[in-house]
Amino acid sequence: MLMAKQARKTAASTRNGTKTGTKTGTKTGTRNPNDLPAEIKIDITFPVYAAGAYSHKDVNVDEDTVMSMYRNMLLQRRFEERAAQMYGKQKIAGFLHLYIGQEAISTGTATAINIGEDSVITAYRDHGHGLALGMTANECMAELFGRVDGSSRGKGGSMHYFSKKHGFFGGHGIVGAHVPVGVGIAFAHKYKEDGGVSISFFGDGAVGQGAIHEASNLASLYDLPAILVVENNQYAMGTAVHRAFAETEFTHHAAGYDMTAALVDGMDVFAVTKAMQDHVKLAREGKPSMLEIRTYRYRGHSMSDPQKYRTKEELEAKQNEDPIIRLKKYIIDNGISSADTLDAMDDEVKQEVLDSVEFADNSPFPDLSAIYEDVYEEDDYPYLA
């Protein structure tokens, strides 16, 4: 039985950049339950956005934008590295989930949307998305330190970044629970007729949460401007995808909700940008979709993760796919900038992050009197009486 199931999965192969699947949301037959069709045919193809398939010209960005994308990815990487160091020094308490290795996803998304008009919501691995959307290293680091100058005034910490200005709705700690919120935000965009799109990011481990499937159904049923994005870093909290899911091709899941889907190489920022551009366009037309973006985190699930579920050899091999190194090579190979200029940019970014640590350290802790601020709309907190 297991061999038969594996054979069916193996039959789904990649040909000419298209993922050939075995499921579709379109069924032939009648709606009358008493008049059954002779058969139900289900066939569908899922496009694949492969690494190396797109240039900056293919995604309509100029060379200055390419450099900005590279700088932003560097900022995310250096910020996370410094955050890990500060966690070790006990400047940061609680949990810390680093985005190292996944920077192409956040940056590609930010490049493809109207920041401030469109909406982004994600789980607890949220630092990269915040920085990609334009939040400063200062406010992000101060939030990690639990200081009043943080993006959530020091009350949210690592897992709860927010920025109304940038249309960033968090940072959420409960696995999968934020996706219905993201779909609700998409409903709000449609209701207000403001042209906005809501993008909900969640990890591969969250795919098993029922709330995501309920939200997917409603997004499709109501034709909402929603994009549901699986950031598949392949191990969830520490369990490989093939050990947790009967259907490991997450694009196939979209068929059950009559949604379009695509598979994206999340280690290539141009592949992510192109996929997002295409699916943002669909969302603005009232066509929700699902993206599976395959990526790889170079650090543990959190700082306490011993990472015994993967080998050292696997991790070293994956370093060759580093999205920042890939983009740096592209920039140099295409004569957009020189190695010396990029190295100088790296030094500048490292100093920016170092300055953010000083800023955070000098920011005061929230006053105890502010503990109930921003909890209830009412100033007198009637629910606490």
Image (tube, rainbow, N blue to C red):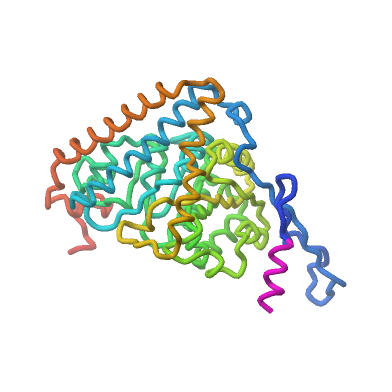
Question: Residue 361: in sight, yes or no?
Answer: yes
Quick one: 142 or 76, which is closer to the camera?
76
The quarter of the image holding the C terminus is bottom left
Quick one: 69 or 304, which is closer to the camera?
304
Residue 26 placement, left or right of 278: right
Q: Main secondary structure of the magenta part?
A: helix
Residue 82 within the segment the image draws in magenta: no
Eyeballing the image, is 242 above or below 349? Answer: below
Image: magenta residue range: 1-11
The quarter of the image holding the N terminus is bottom right
Measuring 50% from the left and 27% from the top, which residue is drawn there? 66
Measuring 18% from the left and 36% from the top, which residue is drawn there? 358
Q: Residue 112: x, y in percent?
A: 54, 35
Residue that protrudes farthest toward the front in the picture: 313
Measuring 84% from the left and 74% from the top, which residue is drawn there? 35
Residue 268 placement, left or right of 139: right
Measuring 20% from the left and 63% from the top, which residue is drawn there? 384
Residue 88 placement, left or right of 327: left
Quick one: 177 or 80, which is closer to the camera?
80
Q: Residue 121: x, y in percent?
A: 44, 49
> Which quadrant of the figure has residue 134?
top left
Q: Residue 271: x, y in percent?
A: 59, 39
Quick one: 282 or 43, which is closer to the camera?
43
Residue 164 placement, left or right of 247: left
Residue 5 within the segment the image draws in magenta: yes
Q: How many marks?
A: 0
Q: Residue 128: x, y in percent?
A: 39, 43
> Which quadrant of the figure has residue 80?
top left
Residue that protrudes farthest toward the bottom in the picture: 1
